[in-house]
Image (tube, helix red, strand yellow):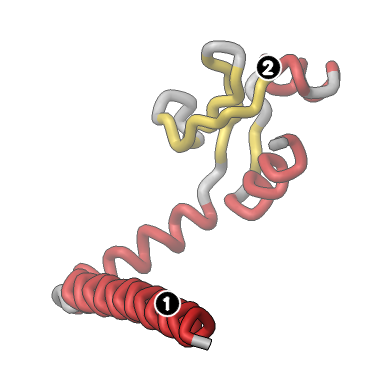
Amino acid sequence: MRKSILSIGYLCAVFLIMAGFFYSYHLGEERENDEKKQKAAVSFSGSSESLIEAAVEADAMEKARFVLGEEDGRILVLLEDGHTVYEYTDIRISDLPESVQEEVYSGKTIENAAELYSFLENYSS
């Protein structure tokens, strides 16, 4: 009888300890999320001019044209000028079909950001 009471006591103690760890972990997660929200609020509380400039820039990037190139055997996305790097990718040229490889080597032009991300999504792993 005494043995079963002790084992029940140990189980209760272990349960309480685990519940305490879980609660403290959950509390830490909430604090971390609150800090992230505060930082985001601070970063967005800039002047309306800077927000408008960011929106205009985002709209311009959506309408921008891109050129595909190659660097170190991987696809490189350049802006329309052909010199400014927009994005480095991990997509290997050798993994593409030969016709697409030829297009990339000849500087394939992509008309907008939606088409670019569709292309990248199709050929990424």
Specify the farthest residue to the top. 72
Task: Please tell me in which quadrant of the rendered image residue 69 appears.
Answer: top right
What is the x, y in percent for residue 58? 41, 60
Q: Secondary structure at mark 2?
A: loop
Q: Residue at x 42, y 77 (%)?
A: 10
- The amino acid sitting under disc 1 is Tyr
- Residue 49 visible in image: no
- Residue 104 visible in image: yes
Q: On screen, 45 above or below 77?
A: below
Task: Indicate which disc residue 108 carries.
Answer: none
Q: Residue at x 28, y 73 (%)?
A: 28
Task: Indicate which disc residue 106 carries.
Answer: 2
Q: CA distance from mark 1 to mark 2?
A: 72 Å
Task: Indicate which disc residue 10 carries.
Answer: 1
- The amino acid sitting under disc 2 is Ser
Of residues 70 and 61, the one nearer the viewer is 70
Which quadrant of the figure contains the C terminus? top right
N-terminal-most mark, 1 or 2: 1
Is 36 left, or right, of 6 in this rendering?
left
Is 74 left, or right, of 94 in this rendering?
left
Q: On screen, 16 above or below 83?
A: below
Q: Secondary structure at mark 1?
A: helix
Is 72 left, or right, of 41 in this rendering?
right
